[in-house]
Amino acid sequence: MAVPGITRRPITKSQLADGLFGLLVGLLGLGVLGLAVAIGINLASGAGPALGRFGPVFFSRSVWDPVREEFGALPFIYGTLATSFLALLLGAPVALATAVFLAELAPRWLRGPVSYLVELLAAIPSVVYGLWGLFVLAPLLRAAIEPALGGWLGSVPLFQGPFYGVGIFTGGIILAIMVIPTIAAVSRDVIRAVPADQREAMLALGATRWETIRLAVLPAARSGIIGAVLLGLGRALGETMAVTMVIGNRPEIPASIFAPGYTMAAVIANEFTEATSDLHLSALFGIGLGLFLLTLLVNILARLLVWRVAWGPVGGE
């Protein structure tokens, strides 16, 4: 029923176009979320038979015998976490030092080329890293580095045993090189987001350049740097080809980091097309589900920490 004295203004073409554009963008955004949910549901459905037979113990069993249809994901979880944390231990300090240099110390004429070269490392295909690791890094580790570490730290079980050249240590080094661009790029942006007032205040108080970086810049960017490290961890957790080529692919939990191991992504890549039974295939789906949830959790936590610096109070105060 029309109300006297009030006229309805017709919808213009621009308003209609804005509405359609907003609807389209919203559908596309929800579609990405729906795709992630669909992947999770598909993985959970495929893992149903294995989880139904072994239960949650599937993730704590250490046996992997496709012939007897006995499966457990613990060796692959261990290999994934061991190589990933070793990668962070080796790569995060180098990446953070690179980020500090690019954001605070590098002259303008050098900052651009070095930033480009660091980010270029992320564009190298993982199979190239794997080939380099297999034919260059592994022989070097077997002949020189691993024997030296074994001689210095041989009393520690982690550094005992024969030197294969391929193993968890080699996989960790390859992953360390691969996560450096991610951690360095995000940390550089987070450090540059710290207000210049904080630097100027420290310098005005008589602080040196290093004291300013250590006491004013890095504490303010702490949450974002942690987020960058977690993003690098997510990158390391999901890496497949390069690690598959250098880790040795042995489904055991070794006591030494020099020994061969296996990762969750590597076992899926190696055995998915060769699975001869439904239970074997379901066990691989179970490993994929665990890897999916682990990487999803790490990346969500990392994004939250980065956004805290970008949009929240600087320094988390």
Image: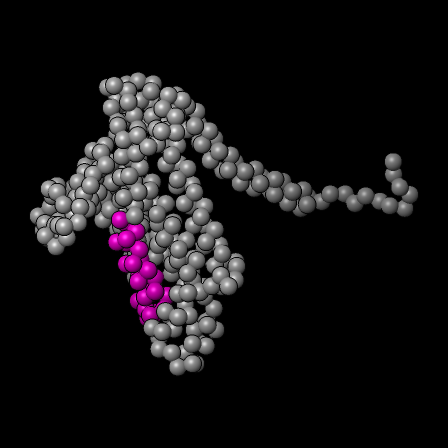
Is residue 178 in sight in this rendering?
A: no
Say left or right for 11 vs 114.
right
Q: Is residue 185 visible?
A: yes
Q: Assign the N terminus to one quadrant of the image.
A: top right
Q: Give residue 113's position: percent from left, percent from top.
A: 31, 62
Toward which corner of the image does residue 288 lie, by quadrant?
top left
Residue at 67%, 46% (x, y): give it: 14
Left or right, 243 with respect to 206, comes to: left
Question: What residue is rendered at 27% in x and 49% in y?
Answer: 87
Residue numbers of the magenta segment? 86-111
Residue at 39 percent across and 26 percent down: it is 55
- Specify whether residue 187 is painted magenta: no
Name the quadrant containing residue 234: top left
Query: In the image, residue 154 lies at what x, y percent?
Result: 13, 50
Q: Is residue 160 above or below residue 219?
A: above
In terms of depth relative to the viewer, which is nearer, 190 or 77? 77
Residue 50 percent coordinates (x, y): 36, 23
